[in-house]
């Protein structure tokens, strides 16, 4: 038996509060106690436990401190990765922009599920405070916050500077990464690995990410 711990860890948690971009204020809700006990049972029964990052391994241990020794004895960190031939295409920025019909603006790209822990509300606020109208933010992805983010964008007067690209097919993602000037990972919590960082770096595009979750295990390895 092998347990992919990050998948199992998310279900018992609900967002209670964020304390300085950390998980310190997250708490287990009473209604999820049964799921938490079930997770502990599976962790005890598994012969091996795999995690995508050291951060997630520590989160598993933090969620089940009474199993700490058993978890660390059975756990292995197997980091994620990306397909270099798919994203390291060598396509230049000008060629990619022409294919996508983008202009000459400086483009910040966020490839994210539109969910609370992704920090996209903060990213919109930052773009709203930017003095340069030549900066365009493109958000690729879908999720439960889509309508709320669009409303926030309108309230900030950013409709002409922010593009919601929706779901981007896999075959087009390399073009988006290659065309962008910077990829932004504005995570505020629970970044288990950060595959978008991997994909962007494979495309030759720099990444800006806060030291949240496993972000430092990817972006911390480059300047």
Image: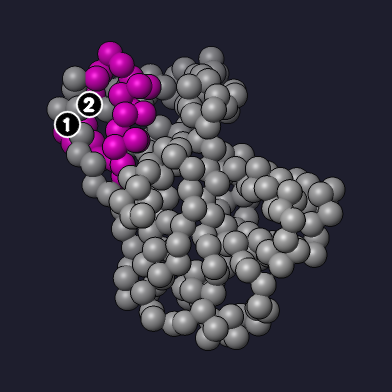
Question: What is the magenta segment's predominant secondary structure?
Answer: helix
**Residue at x 49% of width, y 53% of height:** 208
Decide: is 84 above or below 91.
above
Residue 195 among magenta residues: no
The quadrant where residue 66 appears:
top left
Q: Residue tagged by mark 2?
A: 71
- Residue 77 % position (x, y): 23, 41
- Number of numbered discs: 2
- Res 150 seen here: no
- Residue 221 % position (x, y): 31, 51
Res 167 label: none
18 lies left or right of 222: right
79 lies left or right of 163: left
The quadrant where residue 16 appears:
top right
**Residue at x 81% of width, y 49% of height:** 156
- Residue 173 % position (x, y): 50, 70
Nearer to me, 2 or 153: 153
- Residue 174 % position (x, y): 47, 73
Label 2 SS: helix
Looking at the rendering, the stretch of residues picked out in magenta corresponds to 44-68
**What separation in Å lies between label 1 and label 2 (alpha carbons)?**
5 Å
Circles 1 and 2: CB distance less than 8 Å?
yes
**Residue at x 84% of width, y 54% of height:** 157
Q: Residue tagged by mark 1?
A: 74
- Res 127 seen here: yes
Query: Callout 1: few (<14), some (14-19), or many (20+) C-alpha neighbours within 10 Å?
Result: some
175 lies left or right of 219: right
């Amino acid at each position: 038996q092998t347990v992919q711990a990050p998948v199992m860890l998310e279900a018992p948690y609900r967002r209670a509060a964020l304390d300085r971009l950390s998980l310190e204020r997250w708490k287990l809700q009473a209604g999820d106690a049964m799921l938490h006990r079930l997770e502990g049972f599976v962790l005890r029964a598994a012969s091996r436990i795999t995690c995508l990052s050291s951060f997630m391994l520590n989160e598993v241990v933090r969620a089940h401190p009474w199993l700490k020794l058993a978890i660390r004895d059975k756990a292995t960190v197997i980091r994620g990765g990306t397909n270099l031939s798919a994203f390291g295409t060598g396509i230049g920025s000008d060629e990619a922009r022409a294919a996508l019909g983008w202009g000459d603006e400086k483009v910040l790209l966020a490839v994210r599920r539109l969910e609370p822990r992704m920090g996209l509300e903060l990213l919109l606020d930052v773009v709203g405070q930017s003095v340069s109208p030549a900066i365009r933010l493109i958000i690729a992805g879908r999720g439960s916050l889509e309508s709320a983010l669009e409303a926030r964008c309108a309230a900030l007067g950013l409709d002409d500077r922010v593009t919601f690209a929706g779901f981007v097919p896999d075959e087009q993602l390399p073009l988006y990464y290659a065309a962008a000037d910077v990829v932004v990972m504005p995570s505020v919590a629970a970044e288990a690995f950060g595959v978008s960082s991997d994909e962007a770096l494979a495309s030759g595009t720099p990444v800006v990410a806060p030291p949240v979750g496993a972000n430092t295990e990817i972006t911390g390895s480059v300047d």
